Image: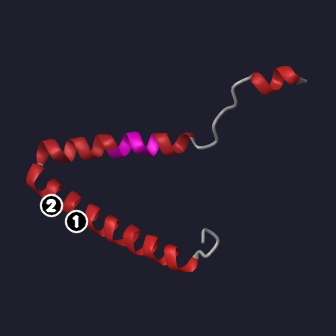
Amino acid sequence: MADTALLPQKSSIWWIFLLQGFAGIVLGLMLITEPGATVVALTTVLGFYWLITGLLGLVQVFVDRSTT
């Protein structure tokens, strides 16, 4: 019974790594073919991502009272 706990378990999130690989390939191809447009698009996406996560972080600080 204890031997089964030591066996490696298959991950159920294998598809996330597959998507990450596809995204890397697409991003690489975009950077090779159109580097200027890709950098502009990535800058815009990163800007919105950081803005949204920053706002959600601030909301969590004021809403989550369990840490104080």
The residue that disc 1 covers is 44
The residue that disc 2 covers is 40
Q: Please state which of residues 58 and 33 is positioned toward the viewer in this rendering.
A: 58
Which residue is found at the position 48% from the left and 78% from the top? 59
Q: Are marks 1 and 2 in contact (CB under 8 Å)?
A: yes
Q: Please state which of residues 16 and 59 is positioned toward the viewer in this rendering.
A: 59
Q: Is residue 2 magenta?
A: no
Q: Is residue 32 left or right of residue 1?
A: left
Q: Identify the secondary structure beneath mark 1.
A: helix
Q: Please state which of residues 46 and 58 is positioned toward the viewer in this rendering.
A: 58
User: How many numbered circles does the render carry?
Assistant: 2
Tell me the quarter of the image containing the N terminus. top right
Give residue 22's position: percent from left, percent from top: 37, 42
Residue type, numbered disc 1: Thr
Q: Identify the secondary structure beneath mark 2.
A: helix
| Residue 37 figure quarter | bottom left
| 66 is higher (above) or lower (below) than 30 | below
Residue type, numbered disc 2: Val
